[in-house]
Image (tube, helix red, strand yellow):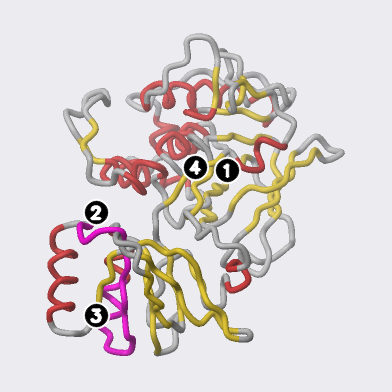
Amino acid sequence: MTDADTTPIDTDAVVIGAGPVGLYQVFQLGLLEVRAHVIDALPRAGGQLVELYPDKPIYDLPGIAACTGRQLSDALLAQIAPFQPVFHFRHEAQTLRRLPDGRWEIGTRAPDATEGMRLRARALFIAAGVGAFAPKRLKFPGIQAWEGRQLFYRALTEADLPAGRVLIVGGGQAALACAVALAESGRYAVTLTYRRNQFQADAATVARWCDLQAQGRAQFIAGLPVGFDAEGERLAALRISDHAGVEQRVALDALIVLQGISPRLGPIADWGLALERKQLAVDAERFATDAPGIFAVGDINTYPGKKKLLVCGFHEAVLAAWGALPVLFPGQPEPPLQYTTSSTHLQALLGVS
């Protein structure tokens, strides 16, 4: 089944959010032999830590003196690998409805697919952090008409683009890496624009970009986009203003905008779940929302005494998994608590010899 297939996907549980807490939720569900599908609007696991702070050290995880966001994400992915979760990246949860049999159906939207998906599960775990991350878009009325044709909010490769003039907006790692890759291919006239000639990227990528500029294989324009020009059905140019207010028209065949991402609660706010200050209200025993079978963990929830710390989110994921058992396995007694250090059953699930 492809991500564009509209046939509903049946599973035990759906986790919204592939950040650290969402990944640990998958682990706790796996220990209870619950199958999980994971939805995330980003193109990879790791959430905010990987997208915004991949190389910044974290110092407050138990037993770990220091690790980066990327290292933590990689470790969590390795930890859940035995449970074979199914990831659906670049999918944003859009709709939610209760089915006659008590299950929940989640509908998604995927910008890179012709259609989204429908997933059906008895339990839904919302681990969306501060919300779904979406690319920061250009806010010029009418420019959205070229999205997916000439205007893109993701890094593209040679496989995605015909040869031509490419204008890239942004000064972070993603923008520079995309500009470097396209310029090195020799198939594109690459121009990068950013508000200043100081980039938020690693030293190696910046150095390579400067080399390409010096060789005349790419160019840079310091300034801010202020408008666009269209010619018939084509997006023809972006207008850029420098710090002195002088406007320059940059002709293009493709426009790639990589200005970073920003969180928003998005459609979750319209699902009818109890909210307090744009956060999902939960009980502190099971981390259940006011809808049966829907749980919320991590920064997206609120309850008396809430602390927005990773270690607290991990604790919440444990209790949410156990709290969901009556929904997942109605009429069955709660299983005894087992420990991975001594339980041969849990070790078998984890592939420990």
The residue pinned by badge 4 equals 263
Q: Amino acid at mark 1?
A: Arg
Whether 7 is among the magenta residues is no
Q: Give the Cα separation between the discs numbered 4 and 2.
A: 19 Å
- Residue pictured at 40% horizontal, 61% vertical: 258
Say whether residue 92 is visible: yes
Q: Local crowd at mark 2 within 10 Å, few (<14), some, or many (≥20)?
A: some
Q: Position of residue 68 (x, y in %)?
A: 24, 40
Q: Secondary structure at mark 3?
A: strand
Camera-side mark, 2 or 1: 2
Among the two numbered marks 1 and 3 on one chain, the one whose residue lies closer to the N terminus: 1
- Residue pictured at 59% horizontal, 51% vertical: 92
Check the image and report above or below for 300 versus 210. above
Q: Give the Cα separation between the discs numbered 1 and 3.
A: 48 Å
Q: Local crowd at mark 3 within 10 Å, few (<14), some, or many (≥20)?
A: many
The residue pinned by badge 1 equals 35
Q: Position of residue 162 (x, y in %)?
A: 44, 88
Bounds of the magenta segment: 179-199
Q: Amino acid at mark 2?
A: Gln
Question: Who is closer to the viewer here, 132 or 151?
Answer: 151
Residue closest to the far top: 304
Quadrant where the N terminus sits is bottom right
Q: Secondary structure at mark 4?
A: strand
Q: Amino acid at mark 3?
A: Ala
Question: Who is closer to the viewer here, 92 or 162?
Answer: 162
Q: Secondary structure at mark 1?
A: loop
Among the two numbered marks 4 and 2 on one chain, the one whose residue lies closer to the N terminus: 2
The residue pinned by badge 2 equals 200
